Amino acid sequence: MSWQSLDQVYLQESAGKSAGKLPRQRVLGEEVSIYSKQNDEQIQHIGDVSDEYYNKVVNPYVNMGSSSNTDLRAKIEEKLERCNGNIDNNADIWQRYMMEGQFDMSDNKFKSSEQLLLDYIENDQVFYLDNFIKKNWPQSDVTSSYFKPAFATTPEAPRFGRAGEGELYLAYFCNGTKPDKGDLHVAGIDIELKGKGGRLFKANVKKDFSHIQKDFENDDDILDGVTDFICDLSGTQHIKQLVREMVQTFSDDIISEYNFFKTRGRLITGTGTTSSRMIYIGGLAQLYSYQQVQKFDVFSCFINQGNDQILFKLIDMRDVNSLIEIHQAIDTDAVIKFAMRSDGIGWSFANLTLK
């Protein structure tokens, strides 16, 4: 290496000369200029935005609004209008979901999905939502980055109550509409949909433990006392006979829980997939009473288990006349838990697991 003086290095070879970019170097804050041209007008400069904003915001909207996607946008808006859900930015979310997931928008796909839901209703089915959609869109990316935003979109809120997540999603894929009463209308069937914490039958509940603090002479008296306790606890005295039938069905468990209460001074709470039979029967009574008032055909509940796994359960209640029938529909493949609401008015759907 030859020796060079500082004068030669800094003044003769470097001073006043521009330094080039380093390899792969990216200048922060670079801007993208945006221009417009309509028909025969001259090109006009609209403004400049950062490259980050352009890539995240402008470019996706340019792509969605391109002439090649005009028919797709119209189809999406038509479906959302049918579901009473073409509000806020729902159309943008659904267009991005359809484009990112590469969904086939053919009418026969949606008709087939509608029929599949009707088949599931007929069998009181439990299912994961992504698997349900993939039955008719096997090549699509159902759980893409816009799966959660699409599931969270809601239709226009009814006059009484509020719309919930999942309603618009099922309606969109199953040719559904938003009914005057209830959450979802598919092929003439009204479906009531509840997520975790969704309220059931509005009733003033009463924790009157005196019904089960007594020393009864025989098992039948125990079951009668527990029936009174459950009816007060769930606000369903008007269907006491149906509650008594359900209590009789679980008589061994009920007597065991009564003895537990007499010994410990508290109810069995249950853990995991197990639950107090008294609480479970109270939940069934709440659900039955709720259907009698609201007159929906099908009850559906869902739980978000994380990692894009949303578990649904359908219960066909069109010909249900007892709590036993509701239990049988649930017990085929699932476990549902109910809970008393903290406000003291009615109960809620609390959890759903596979059996």
Image: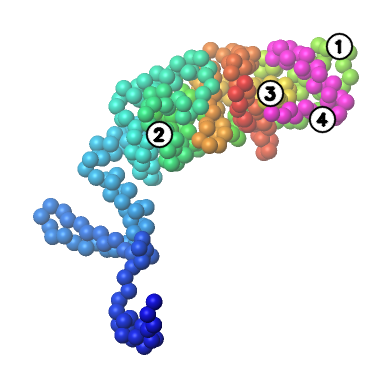
Q: Is residue 12 left or right of residue 225?
A: left
For the residues bearing labels 4 and 3, Cβ distance under 8 angstroms: no
Residue placed at 56% from the left, 32% from the top?
303
Which of labels 4 and 1 is toward the front?
4
Rendered image: mark on residue 208: none
For the residues bearing labels 3 and 1, Cβ distance under 8 angstroms: no
Q: Is residue 137 above or below residue 23?
A: above
Q: Disc 2 designates what residue?
A: 141
Whichever of callouts 2 and 3 sits on the residue coming sooner in the sequence is: 2
Q: Disc 1 designates what residue?
A: 218
In what element is the residue under mark 4? loop
Q: Is residue 211 above or below residue 168?
A: above
Magenta segment includes 127: no
Range shown magenta: 245-272
Which of labels 3 and 1 is toward the front?
3
Where is residue 40, by image quadrant?
bottom left
What amino acid does circle 1 point to? Asn
Q: CA distance from mark 4 to mark 2?
A: 49 Å
Crowding at mark 1 (Cα within 10 Å: few <14, some 14-19, many 20+): few
Where is residue 104, by image quadrant?
top left
In what element is the residue under mark 3? helix
Rendered image: mark on residue 266: 4
Q: CA distance from mark 4 to mark 1?
A: 21 Å
Main SS class of the magenta portion in the image? helix
Residue placed at 34% from the left, 53% from the top?
55
